[in-house]
Image (cartoon, grey):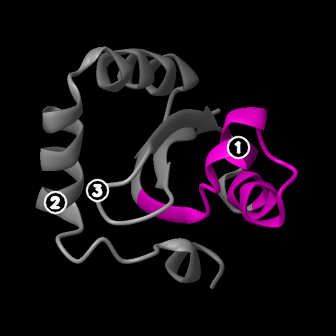
Amino acid sequence: MGGYVYIMTNAVSGTLYTDVTADLVKRVTQHREGTGSDFRKRHGLTRLVHVEHYDRIQEVIWREKVIKAWMRARKLNLIEKNNPEWADLYLTIIW
C-alpha cells in the first residue's frame, strides 16, 4: 500500500508542515476543517502546496524524513520548483 508525503502552509513562504498519509483527501480535509494536528491548528495551515505519491509506504516515510531534515530554503525551493504560484492544490486532489 502506498501513500503521500505532503506540505501544508498558511501563506506563501509561511509556516511549513510536512506529513504523510495513505488517504490524502481525507487528511487534508481534516486539516482544512481544523481537526488535523495541533500544530496545524496553532498555525492555521490550510493550504496544500506540495504532494508526492509513492507506491510503497516505506518510500513515503523515507521521503518525509528526508524533507523534514532539510533546511527551510531547500523546502521552499522544492515547493517553488513544482508549484511556483504556491497554489492551493486541494482542489486538484478532490476531483
The residue mark sitting in front, 1 or 2, is 1
SS assignment at label 2: helix
Query: Relative to the observer, which residue lies in front, 50 or 31?
Result: 31
Question: Between marks 1 and 2, how big is the CA–CA gap?
Answer: 24 Å
Tag 2 and tag 3, C-beta contact below 8 Å: no
Mark 3 is on which residue type? Ser
Return the x and y of residue 44 as percentages of the image width and height: 64, 56
Return the x and y of residue 34 as percentages of the image width and height: 83, 57
Residue identifier under label 3: 13
> Which of the marked residues, 3 or 1, is nearer the chain's N terminus?
3
SS assignment at label 1: helix
Residue identifier under label 2: 80
- The residue sitting at 17% across, 71% down in the picture is 84
Q: Residues within 10 Å of mark 1 (few under 14, many from 20)?
A: few
Mark 2 is on which residue type? Glu
Say which quadrant the N terminus sits in: top right
Question: Between marks 2 and 3, how big is the CA–CA gap?
Answer: 10 Å
Left or right for 85, reference 60: left
Q: Which residues are magenta?
A: 26-49
Query: Relative to the observer, which residue lies in front, 72 or 54?
Result: 72
Residue 83 figure quarter:
bottom left
Q: Residues within 10 Å of mark 2 (few under 14, many from 20)?
A: some
